[in-house]
Amino acid sequence: MRTRKLYEGGGLRTFVLVLDKGDEAFAEISAFARAERVTGAGLTAVGGCREVTLGYFDPEITGYRSTSFAEQMEVLSLVGDIATQDDEPALHAHLVLGRKDSSAIGGHLERAVVFPTLEVVLTETPAHLRKRVDQGTGLALIAPDASSGPA
Amino acid sequence: MRTRKLYEGGGLRTFVLVLDKGDEAFAEISAFARAERVTGAGLTAVGGCREVTLGYFDPEITGYRSTSFAEQMEVLSLVGDIATQDDEPALHAHLVLGRKDSSAIGGHLERAVVFPTLEVVLTETPAHLRKRVDQGTGLALIAPDASSGPA
Amino acid sequence: MRTRKLYEGGGLRTFVLVLDKGDEAFAEISAFARAERVTGAGLTAVGGCREVTLGYFDPEITGYRSTSFAEQMEVLSLVGDIATQDDEPALHAHLVLGRKDSSAIGGHLERAVVFPTLEVVLTETPAHLRKRVDQGTGLALIAPDASSGPA
């Protein structure tokens, strides 16, 4: 992965992250967020991948079911955000993928091996977004009341 | 729904809106836009929902056909904008949803009941975007020439 | 296509581009980027179209396969970026489309004829993003190390 800052001003920072062949997207984006100490951000991406594991939140088991696909697919969209959980950046992103026959699949990003590229635009805000474990589902959800706004 | 301002500066404002279990997304986002007097914005979101009504613009009837789904789905993307129509904020958003078998469906957001969360990043610009009814289709479309740019 | 600047400050510019019935999206967005000398940007869009040609990168032929569809579809998402290649703005965007039965398809944007509208939010950053041809695939990919950050 190679990265570049595109903008910085007034507490806002925008970066482009370009993932290379074989990079795993969840790990690479998370590592970038830790290195840059990102505490609140939104992101979008397009590109391609050749292996993915997608999560589906199943209320019957109150947890995620995972499904893996090993085939070349277009990353039609990756939309997500970064908040902090236990003082570490937590990436939450969803993928839509396009198959050879143009049909679309998608789910919660658990793992995606990039091929040949993934271009991520990440916009960080000065806010500190915190996650808190939700009692009903056990999921860590963004808690705006436990977060802090612009300095 | 709980909200927090993430950034404010130079006429730009960015908010996070976190919708809770059972919140209806179209109504909640629209109510936020009215309360904050948003006149021009873009937004993206990810999360989950358990009921949706999706619109499809059908040129044969020059109007929308609606289809409803009642099942747990991932909100793979919600992309949209806010402009004003008759001095009220008008939300225009499209959804892509992921089903239990990873297949994707989608349409124009008419109604979506959130479960367990929907995380919306909304960026407001200082412009005032106005909609105008299009003669051919009867739809209210953004009219850049009737809008006003940054102050 | 009609356009309006929504924001300008500190090197950031945000525009809305509203494409009209019959406009071809790849050509119109590219022409706008050339006219405004955009060298680095991210964009999202929603709307509808009645003809599309979608690309799929096929590693077996180390190139794109194209598939065309001629039917009214919702543009559920268009996510992409603009960099420069040989000193010209190069648009890279992926589409997700919703059919009458709510199923979703998608791919790399090669051609999309708009109907009745396509609303694009384009955010330009002060960086100059450059593309470079990748030896393995022959594709022009963003090269952060050949790009330049905020002035």
Image (cartoon, coloured by chain):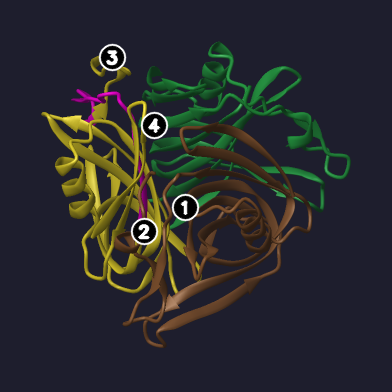
Chain colours: A brown, B yellow, C green
Residue flagged by tag 1: what amino acid is it? Gly
| Residue at the disc numbered 2 | A147
| Residue at the disc numbered 3 | B145
Give the CA separation, mark 2 to mark 3.
Answer: 39 Å
On the image, which quarter does residue B127 sit in?
Answer: top left
Can residue B101 be seen here? The reply is no
Residue flagged by tag 3: what amino acid is it? Asp
Are there few (<14), some (14-19), or many (20+) residues within 10 Å of tag 2?
A: some
Q: Chain of mark 1?
A: A
Give the CA separation, mark 4 to mark 3.
Answer: 16 Å
Residue A98: which disc? none
User: Image point 50% across, 52% down: which residue?
Assistant: C105
Query: Which is in the foreground here, disc 2 or disc 1?
Result: 2
Give the secondary structure at mark 3. Answer: helix
A136 falls in the magenta region: no
| Residue at the disc numbered 4 | C118
Give the secondary structure at mark 4. Answer: strand
Given contact means CB atoms under 8 Å apart, are the residues at marks 2 and 1 in contact?
Answer: yes
Question: In this picture, is A139 found above or below C70?
Answer: below
User: Image point 46% across, 55% down: which residue?
Assistant: C104
